[in-house]
Amino acid sequence: MSKRKTPEINASSMADIAFLLLIFFLVTTTMDTDSGISRKLPPMPEKNQQKSNDKIKERNVFVVLINKNNQLLVEGEPMDVSRLKEKAKEFIENPANNPKLPEKKITEVDSRYFGNKYPVSKGVISLQNDRGTSYGTYIQVQDELLSAYIELRDELSMRIFSQKYDDLITSKKDLVKKIYPQRISEAEPKNVGGGK
Amino acid sequence: MSKFKKSNNKETPPISTSSLPDIIFMLLFFFMVTTTMRQQDLKIKVHVPAAVQIQKLEKKSLVSYIYVGSPIKNFQKIFGTESRIQLNDAFATPGDIRDYITSEREARDENEVPFMTTSLKVDEYTKMGIVTDIKQKLRECNALKINYSTRKGSSE
């Protein structure tokens, strides 16, 4: 049987076709990676829910107010954003057991790493903003507060596991999380410092 | 006439382009893998603020976006420069958020709904009032996982 040789396929237009595809994808797609600060909103209070009586003690709350001129009032005194992280860390940790700073609750933790019990701070950070506050400032403050927590966690995990918090395995991360739980509450909207 | 025919082949031989498609295909695949389809045309200007402590958003298919910002030039005549919400391709009011979330939920599998995240892409100079309204609406329809979209900023 005589085999007829098939002529070679001309592939010179292949490049053009591929270019066309390439350009299509370049135009229709974006490269931005989505990243940001993840938060969980508190669920809506139920209508018939009674106001709980167990009020949080004043010493356990770290109040951060932002007014419409983007100025900060932290625990009753005006403050610059740059000092906020330091102040928040001091509040959460309360190294000198200052009676004005939050109480600690002795919590049972994994005895392999921390000894049997570890005093966990009861501090809660309450962030309140005005309707006129700019979003940029709000995120800046959120970021600083988050940094405070992350630095504390990093310090602890460096001390115990000699690793950064991010590099820990999940079970160890949970241990660290238990000692420094992230408690940032975004209050119900209200006007701080007047003005609509 | 010399014995050896002098090849008058002075011009350079043509460059072989047979590998060009392969190279282009490689580029194509690179872009296909690293990029995502553009979601919609933005009718507002969004310049998200910078932050240090950021996390990457995972599972993009489970993310719904809410854009807030000042309208771009073409729309400023109609809508002014005040910050507006954009959902999908249209301007919206906080009241439309409930419908938007419901439709986003219907588009997903039922057991994926608890993992759905709402990404707020809000312009830096927006006032918090509108953001607070959105947050309240989201709370009402029980879409509690949110993500404030930010750029990566330098520390301090």
Image (tube, rainbow, N blue to C red):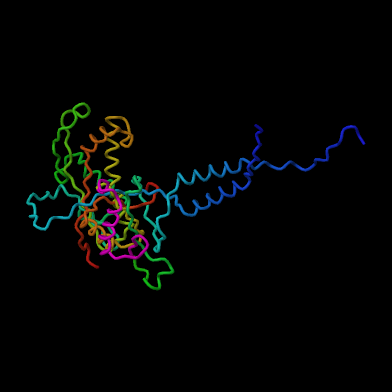
Residue B37: image location, x then y, percent: 43, 52
Residue B155: image location, x then y, percent: 38, 46
Residue A64: image location, x then y, percent: 23, 54
- Reply above or below: A152 against A134: above
Q: Could you tell me which residue is drawn at 32 percent across and 55 percent down? A: B120
Q: Could you tell me which residue is drawn at 61 percent across and 43 percent down? A: B20
A14 with respect to A66 (left or right): right
Q: Is residue A101 magenta?
A: no
Residue A158: image location, x then y, percent: 30, 33
From which residue to which does the magenta span run?
B84-113
Residue at the far top in the pictured view: A112
Q: Is residue B103 magenta?
A: yes
Q: Quadrant of residue B11?
A: top right
Quadrant including the N terminus of chain A: top right
Nearer to us in this view, B152 or B114: B114
Figure disc tally: 0
Q: Could you tell me which residue is drawn at 34 percent across and 65 percent down? A: B91
A64 with respect to A135 (left or right): left
Residue at the far bottom in the pictured view: B77
